[in-house]
Amino acid sequence: MKKILLILTVLLVTNSVSSQANKAVKSGEKFIYAASYNMSGLMTQLAQVTMQTETVKTSKNTLLHLSCQATTYSKWDSFFKIRDVYESFVNPLTLKPSLYKRSIDEGGYTKKEKYVFKGTNVNSTVTKRKRPETQKSFSIGSNTQDVISLLYKVRTIDFSKFKVGQTQSMMIVFDEKEIPVTLKFMGNDTVSAGNLGKKECYKISIGAKTDALRGKDKNLIWLTADTKKIPALLKFSIPVGTGQLTLTSATGI
């Protein structure tokens, strides 16, 4: 699921030069996806991915809490149990993060991460399995964000101004590393978007300098071609096979 989330992120993000102040993402949203994997030639649903937003007030600021949870369906738990939670606390207008948290349990492998953002500096705390906690400080670019905040940042972009074949470069931070990504606009398409019905969508291909992605134009995302730009469908190709995330329900929009 770690690779699936990374793929989803790089399929959704782009340079802040093309982004606008947030008018699309609001508190109270809930998107549910069915995660499927190609098993012996058949696309089989293995897990549910839930993305939610809520307002959180601190003593100094009002933040938007973004979360993404991945949970295998109970019948697959004995095969490979997944219980992952990713969180980001961001400025509601710019979607710039101040805190990122990740807690994963995948087939018995556990890991917890926390990033505290201070400008272009990040202070990270990481715990793997039962090993001692490690701490690290590193620098990132001024437009680099965490994996979750960029899942939402994409929805501030006006893809209607993109030309077919147009590309753009950007950076994400994942596992304490910055990853270069190239986004390519593939045009418009119509796909099923769960309870929203058939929707016209922006079709986007992604290339990234990571071993997590395989094949040219094999990793694709469809975003609804409206002001919300909701991720309706994702198809990915990774070293161990292919799969997809399909939107089943979108509420609070």
Image (tube, rainbow, N blue to C red):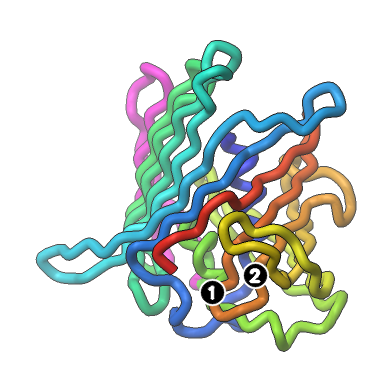
Give the labeled residue for mark 2.
224
- Dot 2: what SS? strand
Mark 2 vs 1: CB contact within 8 A: yes
Can the viewer see residue 50?
Answer: yes
Residue 29 vertical position relative to residue 62 in the rendered view, above or below: above
Residue 218 at x, y percent in the picture = 85, 50
Above-or-below relation of 158 to 50: below
Would you say residue 49 sits in the magenta stretch? no
Q: Is residue 10 found left or right of 166 in the rendered image? A: left
Residue extending farthest top? 78
Kind of residue at disc 2 = Thr
The span from disc 2 to disc 1 (Cα, nearest Å) is: 7 Å
Give the amino acid type for the residue marked by disc 1 in the picture. Lys
Q: Nearer the viewer, residue 140 or 54?
A: 54
Give the residue displayed 53% in from the left and 26% down from the top. 73
- Report the front residue among 79 and 169: 79
Q: Magenta part mainly helix, strand or loop? A: strand
Tell me residue 197's x, y (percent): 64, 62
The residue under the point 75% across, 45% down is: 236
- The residue range painted magenta reads 120-142
Residue tagged by mark 1? 228
> Which SS class for mark 1?
loop
Give the position of the N terminus as an image quadrant: top right
Is 137 in front, or is 4? 4
Q: Residues within 10 Å of mark 1 (few under 14, many from 20)?
A: some
Question: Residue 252 sits in which quadrant?
Answer: bottom left
Q: Is 178 positioned to the left or the right of 186 in the image?
A: left
In the picture, measured across the screen, residue 237 lies left or right of residue 52, that is right
Residue 74, placed above or below residue 141 = above
Q: Residue at x 74, y 61 (%)?
A: 191
Residue 147 visible? The answer is no
